């Protein structure tokens, strides 16, 4: 995966942090940006980086051990030289599935150090991605068993949205104009329904508009139709797939289902038996005993395809998606190598930004930088949620929670 000098632009150098398996980095590079250094803490991901991109300087370890002065000294940079800083600060601190400790979580603290490095290096642009849960994460989390009429009202720092407002305020103090929205990657040629927040921060001038979609579920507005799982796996040939295993007691039910089906398609008499205690739980539960459909995009790839509530079963085989199939759905090159054990590989791929979406992000940024963006993309749907763009989100948070910002 080494790139010749001829493919690189010295004027568009970037550093990435929380780089993982380099999904975002590869996409940005394919768009025309030049990676000069990456930072990653996870040992297996570091091995993946070294295996595939030994030509890019790797800072293996905790981001909090890095300083802007050290990076500038090592890389021969001056403040303001970088075209961009990119990264995906850990999302678990803000995920609706986790404990929602926000910036008081250790992983939240590395987010703040990420902002400190931006302040010290002063790149022209910043790109970072996160989960939708960041929109409602508080700056300070109060456990749910300490809320209600018997407890004091929530303080301002404990209200939804406080963490992101604080992050935006820090960037604003450094002179950056930040815009963001929630994007479904299927709208950009990725064969996967995966929704992530993408933030752009610009050091000088106006905010960066939203990324124009290239695809639509039904090909409306002159766009291409969504890519399907069949298209994603068309070139994947495996004699012995590297994949996890479903527990034997669940195989019986998977064998009864066809592509695109889940537990609700089992005979009524078997649904309760198959689901156990989860049968009485609320929610749609569509991830239980889920077989993927050939002619639709894949659901969001999680870090383990064998978990009961988020199963990712092959459309026709009685097994989870394989590591290679995961990588193809995340649009990594077929010859890309992932290091570590099987769980490590699933985790790296499941956490990555799809490479094709990374290229869409980079292409958009370059067009903006060169003054080639059209203005109005309001006709397009970017995700299935409303109120997730920076303007409507901020209005909602400030109005509903009476924040002083």
Image (tube, helix red, strand yellow):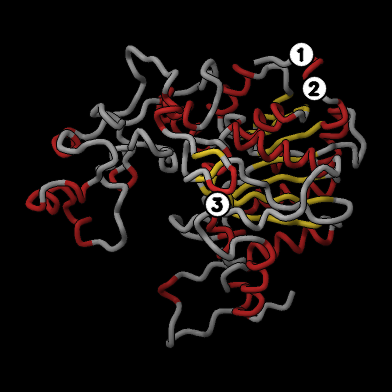
Q: Position of residue 367 (x, y in %)?
A: 79, 40
One can see residue 163 in this view: yes
Q: Residue at x 92, y 36 (%)?
A: 78
Residue 48 located left or right of residue 361: left
Q: Are marks 2 and 1 in contact (CB under 8 Å)?
A: yes
Query: Mark 1 to mark 3: distance in Å?
Result: 34 Å
- Depth check: 134 or 33 in front? 33
Numbered disc 2: secondary structure: loop
> Quick check: 60 above or below 369?
above
> Quick check: 89 above or below 340?
below
Q: In which quadrant of the rendered image does the C terminus lie?
A: bottom right
Determine which quarter of the picture holds residue 105.
bottom right
- Depth check: 113 or 397 in front? 397
- Tell which circle, 1 or 3, labels the residue nearer the N-terminal end: 1
Q: Nearer the viewer, mark 3 or mark 2?
A: 2
Q: In which quadrant of the rendered image does the N terminus lie?
A: top right
Q: Residue at x 54, y 56 (%)?
A: 132
Q: Which residue is mark 1?
A: 4
Residue 349 located left or right of residue 88: left
Question: How many other residues sit within 10 Å of disc 2, few (<14), some (14-19) or many (≥20)?
Answer: some
Numbered disc 3: secondary structure: loop
Q: Which mark is residue 8?
A: 2
Query: Mark 3 to mark 2: distance in Å?
Result: 30 Å
Residue 306 located left or right of residue 386: left
């Amino acid at each position: 995966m080494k790139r010749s000098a001829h493919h690189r632009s010295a004027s568009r150098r970037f550093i990435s942090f929380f780089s993982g398996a380099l999904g975002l980095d590869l996409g940005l590079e394919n768009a025309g940006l030049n990676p000069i250094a990456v930072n990653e803490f996870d040992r297996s991901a570091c091995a993946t980086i070294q295996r595939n991109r030994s030509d890019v300087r790797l800072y293996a370890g905790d981001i909090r051990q890095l300083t802007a002065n050290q990076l500038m000294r090592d890389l021969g940079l001056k403040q303001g030289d970088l075209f961009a800083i990119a990264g995906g600060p850990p999302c678990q601190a803000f995920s609706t599935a986790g404990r929602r400790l926000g910036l008081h979580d250790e992983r939240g603290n590395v987010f703040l150090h990420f902002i400190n490095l931006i302040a010290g290096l002063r790149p022209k642009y910043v790109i970072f991605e996160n989960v939708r849960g960041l929109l409602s994460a508080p700056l300070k989390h109060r456990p749910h068993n300490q809320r209600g009429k018997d407890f004091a009202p929530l303080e301002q720092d404990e209200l939804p949205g406080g963490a992101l407002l604080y992050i935006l305020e820090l960037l604003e103090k450094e002179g950056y104009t930040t815009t963001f929205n929630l994007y479904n990657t299927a709208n950009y040629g990725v064969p996967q329904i995966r929704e992530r927040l993408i933030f752009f921060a610009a050091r000088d001038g106006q905010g960066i508009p939203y990324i124009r979609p290239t695809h639509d579920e039904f090909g409306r507005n002159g766009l291409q139709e969504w890519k399907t799982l069949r298209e994603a796996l068309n070139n994947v040939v495996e004699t012995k797939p590297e994949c996890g295993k479903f527990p034997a007691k669940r195989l019986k039910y998977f064998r009864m289902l066809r592509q695109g089906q889940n537990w609700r398609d089992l005979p009524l008499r078997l649904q309760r038996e198959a689901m156990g205690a989860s049968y009485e739980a609320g929610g749609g539960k569509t991830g239980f005993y889920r077989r993927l459909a050939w002619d639709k995009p894949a659901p969001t790839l999680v870090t383990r395809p064998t978990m009961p509530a988020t199963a990712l079963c092959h459309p026709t085989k009685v097994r989870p998606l394989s590591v290679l199939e995961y990588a193809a759905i995340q649009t990594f090159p077929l010859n890309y190598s992932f290091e570590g054990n099987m769980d490590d590989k699933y985790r790296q791929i499941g956490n990555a930004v799809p490479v094709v979406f990374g290229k869409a992000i980079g292409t958009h940024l370059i067009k903006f930088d060169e003054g080639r963006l059209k203005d109005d993309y309001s006709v397009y749907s970017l995700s299935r949620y409303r109120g997730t763009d920076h303007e409507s989100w901020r209005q909602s948070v400030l109005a509903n929670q009476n924040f002083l910002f």
